[in-house]
Amino acid sequence: MDDRPILLLGCGYTAARAARVLLARGRRVLATTRDPAALADLAAAGAEVLPLDLADPASTAAFASRVPAGAAVLSSVPSLPGPEGPRDPGPAIREALGDRPARVVLLSTTGVYGDTPEVDERTPPAPRTPRQVVRRETEISVAAGPWSTLVLRPAAIYGPGRGLLEMLRAGRYRIPGDGGNHVSRIHAGDLAALSLAGLDSDLTGAFPVADDHAGTVREVVAFAADLLGVPMPPSVPPVDLHETLRSDRRVDGRAIRRRLDVTLRYPDYRSGFPACL
Ligand SMILES: NC(=O)c1ccc[n+]([C@@H]2O[C@H](COP(=O)([O-])OP(=O)(O)OC[C@H]3O[C@@H](n4cnc5c(N)ncnc54)[C@H](OP(=O)(O)O)[C@@H]3O)[C@@H](O)[C@H]2O)c1
């Protein structure tokens, strides 16, 4: 068994799932947050919770000495907010990690493929919006660090308490146009499993991550509404929605699963959504 310490840089929805698996396996887990009280459960389960705000230069500078030499790092940190829009956290991640980690797995996004409608592991990034461009910049800056890097680009992440089901339940979901656009997704538990396999491997490069079925929004929402017993939500002009809610992208995520030998627990929303309830 690999026994490198694992540092979860940003321990949010997906990384917290990974943390629980790692702790159950007896691994040393360090997890960062801007609000240590939010990770009290993980601390009680044995994780070493460390404060870190990558938007704060003093916090970032103070952090480097806490990184165990040879650690494997899973970064979930998204773009940082800036006065002129999203900002690349890559330079701050590089400063916070110094030269101590041996390995970094970066959770990026399929947004880096921009408007490309069909995506697989051979598809080059083509970011178009400022959000997408900054995510691609982060991939480049993190991969330039003195460690081996694997970039995982997840499609829409869902799981209990998160995603389409929650938006429908809260009456907040709107269908973009006729709902004919395709959206790929991945259950957070499957993304966590891929992240863990990636941390313990030597695989480098960048791969899209998705389950086996990119349904149209209309098809998926109809299934989810029926499951929850709520009416179909109204449609709105796509332009009124956040860019991540109106994208039209089919993602083939098989390559990374083959390379890391991971089998999906939830191969599509028909198995994954009921498991969220
Ligand atoms: N949600 C989706 O559908 C989706 C789709 C594709 C890709 N992604 C990306 O995949 C990654 C994992 O997603 P997720 O939903 O599991 O993540 P998440 O729950 O949003 O967690 C993000 C983490 O980043 C940390 N963070 C945010 N700002 C920070 C800062 N200034 N300094 C240090 N840490 C900071 C947060 O820590 P604290 O708040 O505890 O400080 C949190 O642990 C993210 O990068 C996300 O953008 C998400």
Image (tube, grey):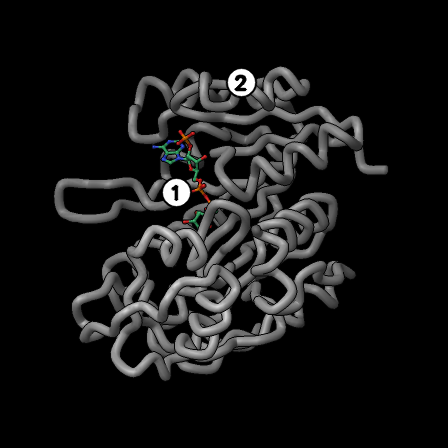
Nearest the viewer among 3 and 245 is: 245
Characterize the local packing of mark 1: few (<14), some (14-19) or many (20 or more) Cα atoms within 10 angstroms: many
Q: Is residue 275 above or below residue 128?
A: above
Which of the 4 image quadrants contains residue 258? bottom right
- Taking the spot 57% from the left edge, 67% from the top edge, the residue there is 269
User: Which of the two labelled residues, at mark 2 and mark 1, occupies the earlier sequence position?
Assistant: 2
Nearest the viewer among 33 and 41 is: 41
- Taking the spot 46% from the left edge, 23% from the top edge, the residue there is 38
* Secondary structure category for the residue under label 1: helix
Q: What is the distance, in whole Å, between disc 2 and disc 1 at their CAs?
A: 27 Å
Identity of the residue furthest to the right in this view:
1
Is the CB–ligand 1 distance for label 2 below 8 Å? no
Residue 276 placement, left or right of 220: right
Q: Is residue 252 above or below residue 256?
A: below
Which quadrant of the frame does ligand 1 lie within? top left
- The x and y percentages for residue 104 are 58, 43
Q: Which mark is residue 112?
A: none
Which three-letter amino acid code belongs to the residue tagged 1? Answer: Gly
- The x and y percentages for residue 21 are 71, 36
Which three-letter amino acid code belongs to the residue tagged 2? Answer: Ala
Q: Which mark is residue 40?
A: 2
- The x and y percentages for residue 94 are 44, 36
Residue 81 placement, left or right of 94: left
- The x and y percentages for residue 167 are 36, 55
Q: Which residue is mark 1?
A: 90
Q: Is residue 104 above or below residue 130?
A: above
Q: Is residue 145 above or below residue 220?
A: above
